[in-house]
Amino acid sequence: MASRRHVLRVPDSDLAGLRSRLRGARWPEAWPGQDADAGWQAGTDESELRRLVRYWAEEYDWRSREADVNALPGWVASVDGASVFYLRFEAEVPGALPIVVTHGWPSSFLELAELARRLAAPSQYGGDAGDAFTVIVPALPGFPFSAQRPDLPPATHEERRYLDEVAAWFADAGGYEHEQMTRPRTLAYGLSDSPAGLLAWLVEKYREWSDCDGDLSRRFSDDFIVTQASLYWFTNAIATSFRPYWEHAKGMTPPVRNVTVPTAVAVFPKDLTHPPRSWAERTYHVTRYTVMPRGGHFAAHEEPAPLADDLTEFFRPLR
């Protein structure tokens, strides 16, 4: 598998085109009688989105963030004919255990950089150099930079409560998933054409799925949010990032049946769902189960220190 260094350089014309679209965004008519909180209840709050769009168009320094991305140890490899971008953080000691950490949707490799640094050089964060990993952070194909079993026992009371939690979440907040599973291309046309629309789709998830109590700034800077949106925009990856949802819904990805290797589960309080240990053990050989005190769906960015500690403790006896 041959690899080459990756250098990002967005053309000036693309930057100018993005700013023109942002400045010329067409906004929907306000709902009659809308109160101050209705915006987030019905979707992305317009006043917050307008503020972020202004920042993206007038103040955000993409070239500085582009330099930050290029300073990361980024490589591109050809895997079965597909180009896959990845970060490789070398361990601070030779012969270290390799580990792959991956993002989900609507994340990117960028969210995992701080976690990767802590895992690769634990002594710089008060840990033991002997716990270092060589860390690989791939950009999943289709994302920015890379192209029930009948024999299970009846669900326990705790598991039924978890399934009820999943059903309640899907009924209240799962519309995005249903759309991305059933009509992803229809949605993609609007989000690929409008940076403001793309930002609205992403920022709602960062607010709702993180441990921020409704205040984005508690967990994410404007710069971070807009950089994530910029990565999706400049790579035109929003449509392809929906594809795993479509393939899953169509049965194109086989379900995981039984994983026998040791598995660790970390449950964060503000993540989308909170599977009990017994539910995870129906599929995985769970040897470590941790209920975290803080954090949400974007835990690698929100709480990199405790997540790195938990991974280190899990892998220590397996080295």
Image: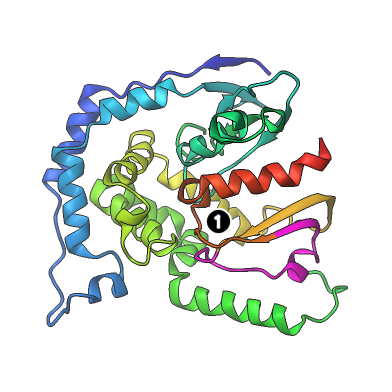
Query: Which residue occupies the extreme bottom position in the image?
Result: 157
The answer to which quarter of the image holds residue 140 is top right
Crowd rating for badge 1 (residues with CA inside 10 Å; few <14, some 14–19, many 20+): some
Left or right for 225, reference 72: left
**In the rendering, at what x and y percent does residue 237 appear?**
42, 40
The answer to which quarter of the image holds residue 255 is bottom right
**In the rendering, at what x and y percent does residue 155 appear?**
77, 80
Residue name at image x 71 percent, y 78 percent: 159
Q: Tell me if residue 278 comes above or below residue 231 in the rendering.
A: below
Kind of residue indicated by mark 1: Tyr
Q: In which quarter of the image is the N terminus?
A: top right
Q: Tell me if residue 220 comes above or below residue 269 in the rendering.
A: above
Q: In which quarter of the image is the C terminus?
A: top right
Residue name at image x 37 percent, y 38 percent: 236
**In the rendering, at what x and y percent does residue 114 appear?**
49, 37
Q: Mark 1 points at which residue?
A: 245
**In the rendering, at what x and y percent does residue 6 appear?**
47, 19
Q: Which of 166 and 299 is in front in this view?
A: 299
Residue name at image x 17 percent, y 53 percent: 51
Residue 302 in view, yes or no: yes
| Element class at badge 1 | helix
Q: Nearer the viewer, residue 77 or 130?
A: 130
Q: Nearer the viewer, residue 239 or 311?
A: 311
**Total numbered labels placed on residues in the image:** 1
Left or right for 303, reference 100: left
Magenta region includes residue 97: no
The residue stretch that appears in magenta: 269-289
Query: Which residue occupies the extreme front position in the image?
Result: 126
Q: Nearer the viewer, residue 192 or 41?
A: 41
Q: Tell me if residue 128 comes above or below residue 163 in the rendering.
A: above
